[in-house]
Amino acid sequence: MKRKLAILLIGTMLVSSILSGCGQGDNKSDSKTADVSGEMKGDITFWHSFTQGQRLDVIQATADQFMEENPGVKITIETFSWGDFYTKWTTGLASGNVPDMSTALPGHVVEMMDAEALVTVDDLIDEIGRDRFSESALSEGEKDGSCYSLPLYSHAQVMWYRKDLLKEAGLEVPKTWKEFAEAAKALTKNGVYGCSFPCGSNDLMGTRFLNFYVRSGGGSLLTDDLKADLTSDLAIDGINYWLDIYKNCS
């Protein structure tokens, strides 16, 4: 049987969440137990994608502190990049070699819920205090009234600009998408590109930029029944707009 777990989400409107593991059978994993004295004992495996130095150090220090306070517990941490998530988890679920906790993006959590790879974390959320979490963040990991992810943080998405380059070119800060494109093209010269637009086939940032465009026009990339909508007139306009930016000033 595939081992189930509790997971962490992360990101832009992302939420880092934790997954709790199940062993063979329907009961929770026996790897973490408490003896009659109440002392915690067992092994915990934690996968995460916080590869930046300071984040990495804080997570390890937190685990070290926990193990010092609970000497019967051993925590093993494995780090992998966000881009390797599917490889890591596809291989792990196929072999039954999955962690007790992991980070994940909201979309990852939904897929893992659908694959019945997770256990609920409602008891943990209630212990911490459900009212301490954003309702919308909790809902991203919710299915049939149960929460399968614990939100850690969300991102604020902004677009920033170089005031010095605009001033040098005699341009005002763009207030419309047309003005944005004109300014970006005017700034693209002498090895400088007017817009940093990510458009990699394995990168979801292109979708976020398209979402900016569609939302600003009062539309959505989702239908009322939450299916992708990339064929509306507004979405097609947005796709053509960002392709123009990509080709001419990115």
Image (cartoon, rainbow, N blue to C red):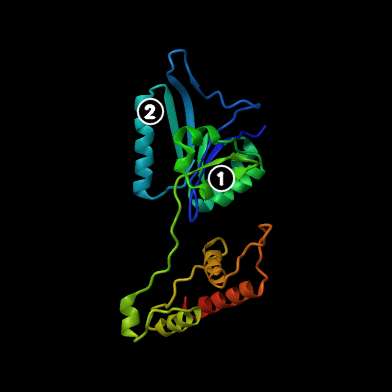
Q: Amino acid at mark 2?
A: Met
Query: Is 36 on the left or on the right of 118, as rendered?
Result: left
So how many labels did they put on this image?
A: 2
Q: Which mark is residue 117?
A: none
Which residue does the numbered mark 2 point to in the structure image?
67
Q: Return the x and y of residue 216 as percentages of the image width and height.
A: 53, 71
Is disc 2 surrounded by few (<14), some (14 to 19) or many (20+) residues within 10 Å?
A: some
Label 2 residue SS: helix
Q: Which mark is residue 88?
A: 1
Q: Amino acid at mark 1?
A: Lys
Q: Return the x and y of residue 6 as percentages of the image width and height.
A: 55, 37
- Which residue occupies 69% across, 57% down? 225
- Which residue occupies 48% across, 79% down? 176
Q: Seen from this angle, which residue lies furthest top?
A: 36
Is disc 1 surrounded by few (<14), some (14 to 19) or many (20+) residues within 10 Å?
A: some
Query: Is 216 on the left or on the right of 193, as rendered?
Result: right
Could you give the CA–CA distance between mark 1 and mark 2, rounded to whole angstroms? 26 Å
Q: Return the x and y of residue 130 as percentages of the image width and height.
A: 49, 39
- Which residue occupies 37% across, 38% down? 60
Label 1 residue SS: helix
Residue 214, placed above or below residue 176:
above
Q: Return the x and y of residue 73 as percentages of the image width and height.
A: 43, 25
- Between residues 214 and 165, which one lies in front from this camera angle? 214
Query: Which of the marked residues, 1 or 2, is nearer the chain's N terminus?
Result: 2
